[in-house]
Amino acid sequence: MIPLLIAVQFMTTVPVRLPYLPSREQNALSMLFYPVIGLLIGGVLWLMASFIHLPIMLLSCLIVVAWVGLTGGLHLDGLADTADAWVGGFGDRERTLAIMKDPNAGAMGVIAIVLCLMLKWASVYGLLMLDDEYDVSFVWLMIPMLGRLGVLVLFATTPYVRQQGLGSALQDVPKFLLWLVVVGFGVMLGVLSWQLAVVMLGVWVVMLSWLRWRFVGRLGGITGDTVGASIEMVEVAMLVSVVAVLYGGWMA
């Protein structure tokens, strides 16, 4: 269970103490549990959406606050660093990587976080509004899970460019194990209606393909910051798409 505990400790703010210093192999295997972390986060969001009775605007704010709080803003930090580096790097690989290592947030990073949270809040508000008309219970679970499942796809298909970075050990996971977990969790989309499953899977594949293309084109691979950015961007894209599908009446 050590890899699972490592995943909980790294990907959430849940207080977990490891009984001993984990090995490099255990750190690597913890990535296989990232989708589980997504389901746990989604479960909290679903419980809040289902059992807290407050004005929808206030509840949607609280859900987004919980979403950020459960992750400690880890992925938002990656999004901010990536946005700063992408704009400030002027297309240069080394300059982009150097900016990513700067702990200070620039204007583009702040803008990226604001836009991300704004879209998340508006989408959560939309889901709550549509909850009486459609059953979106599993949507709360699937979106955080798929956001983290995308990390496995990126590591299975893309080089990690920082050999001493936090994600360097994650390269040690056998590719067949990564794909086995991806397929295993991917079939969970079957709990959704076929329309939502097709839309979410399509958006997930398109976003990951586009992000990977951009990361490889600029950096030659991925970093911890770009992986965090991918989680936020994939989640937002799926949230907006689901609300658009439901609001557009395509489920009728």
Image (tube, rainbow, N blue to C red):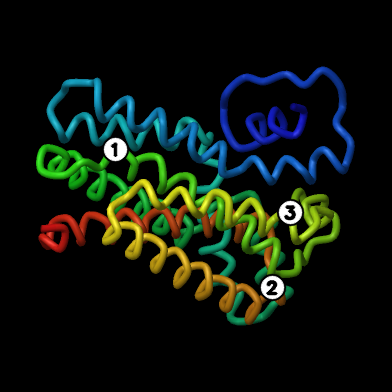
Q: Which residue is mark 1?
A: 137
Which sits earlier in the primary sequence, circle 3 or circle 1?
Answer: 1
Distance CA(mark 1)–CA(mark 2): 44 Å
Quadrant the N terminus occupies: top right
Could you tell me residue 225's position as x and y percent?
62, 56
Question: Which quadrant would residue 101 be assigned to in this image?
Answer: bottom right
Identify the element where label 3 is drawn: helix
The residue that appears at 34% across and 41% down in the rendered structure is 138
The residue that appears at 37% across and 60% down in the rendered structure is 200
Which sits earlier in the primary sequence, circle 1 or circle 2?
Answer: 2
Q: Residues within 10 Å of mark 3 (few under 14, many from 20)?
A: some
Horizontal arrangement in the rendering, residue 9 relative to residue 242 (left or right): right
Q: Which residue type carries mark 1? A: Ser
The residue that appears at 77% across and 28% down in the rendered structure is 2
Q: Residues within 10 Å of mark 1 (few under 14, many from 20)?
A: some
Could you tell me residue 10's position as x and y percent?
66, 35
Q: Which residue type carries mark 2? A: Arg
Give the number of the mark in front: 3 or 2.
3
Q: Are marks 3 and 2 in contact (CB under 8 Å)?
A: no
Could you tell me residue 239's position as x and y percent?
32, 53
Q: Which residue is mark 2?
A: 95
Q: Which residue is mark 3?
A: 177
Q: Which residue type carries mark 3? A: Leu
Could you tell me residue 70's position as x and y percent?
49, 31
